[in-house]
Image (cartoon, rainbow, N blue to C red):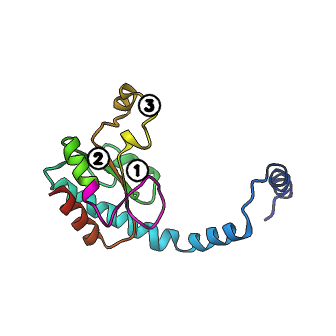
Amino acid sequence: MRDEALAGRLKFLQNAVGAVLGPQDAWLTLRGLKTLALLRLERQQRNALAIARWLQQQPRATGIHYPGLPEDPGHETLARTASGLGAVLSFEVADRLTLERLIAGVSLIAYAESFGGVESLITVPAVQTHTNLSPVERLRLGVTDTLVRLSVGIEDPGDLIADLAVALA
């Protein structure tokens, strides 16, 4: 059922603000939505869970933060409020040298900050996404200098784990 008042308001706002996609952008968005839930996101979530479980066994990775793991403090909230486990996880490494070796050592996983793509990305929030915060504020939020964030893509999970294993070795 069409809500004429809402449609009219949206038309006005789109015209007044210019908040509309161009035809090519709209087509790309629609194309991407067709594979988002059942193909890409499910694969990304499976991959993230596999990586999180693997990281739990790695002595150089500590403080694994992934609400898809039953022992994660956010697991119950996630189970109540979401239909999936998510494709982003974070973990700590022991020191800056290990962090630098990890970032330099990955080859399949790109060092970049973004979410939602099909490729896996690794970031260091303290020097990328949260660099504008003071060290005290970062620590209050749990963003340490050795925190690593992974936005997990659709690559083969064995390949992703192998990439991390080489870089953490």
Q: Amino acid at mark 1?
A: Leu
Disc 1: which residue:
78
Tag 3 secondary structure: loop
Q: CA distance from mark 1 to mark 2?
A: 10 Å
Q: What number is the disc on residue 72?
A: 2
**56 w.r.t. 36: above or below:** above
Q: Identify the mark nearer the N-term, 1 or 2.
A: 2
**144 w.r.t. 164: above or below:** above
**123 w.r.t. 126: above or below:** below
Q: CA distance from mark 3 to mark 1?
A: 27 Å
- Does the stretch in magenta take in 43? no
Displayed quadrant of residue 6: bottom right
Residue at image position (57%, 71%) is: 32
In the rendered structure, the answer to whether residue 92 lies left or right of residue 117 reads left
Q: Identify the mark nearer the N-term, 3 or 1.
A: 1
Tag 2 secondary structure: loop
Which residues are drawn in magenta?
104-121
Q: Nearer the viewer, mark 2 or mark 3?
A: 3
Q: Main secondary structure of the magenta part?
A: loop
Residue at image position (36%, 25%) is: 136
Q: CA distance from mark 2 to mark 3?
A: 26 Å
Q: Amino acid at mark 2?
A: Asp
Q: Nearer the viewer, mark 3 or mark 1?
A: 3
- Residue 5: where, in percent of width, then height? 86, 53
- Does the stretch in magenta take in 109? yes
Number of marks in picture: 3
Q: What number is the disc on residue 133?
A: 3
Q: Amino acid at mark 3?
A: Leu
Q: Residues within 10 Å of mark 1 (few under 14, many from 20)?
A: some
- Residue 30: where, in percent of width, then height? 63, 71
Are circles 1 and 2 on residues that touch, CB within 8 Å? yes
- Residue 100: where, in percent of width, then height? 25, 48
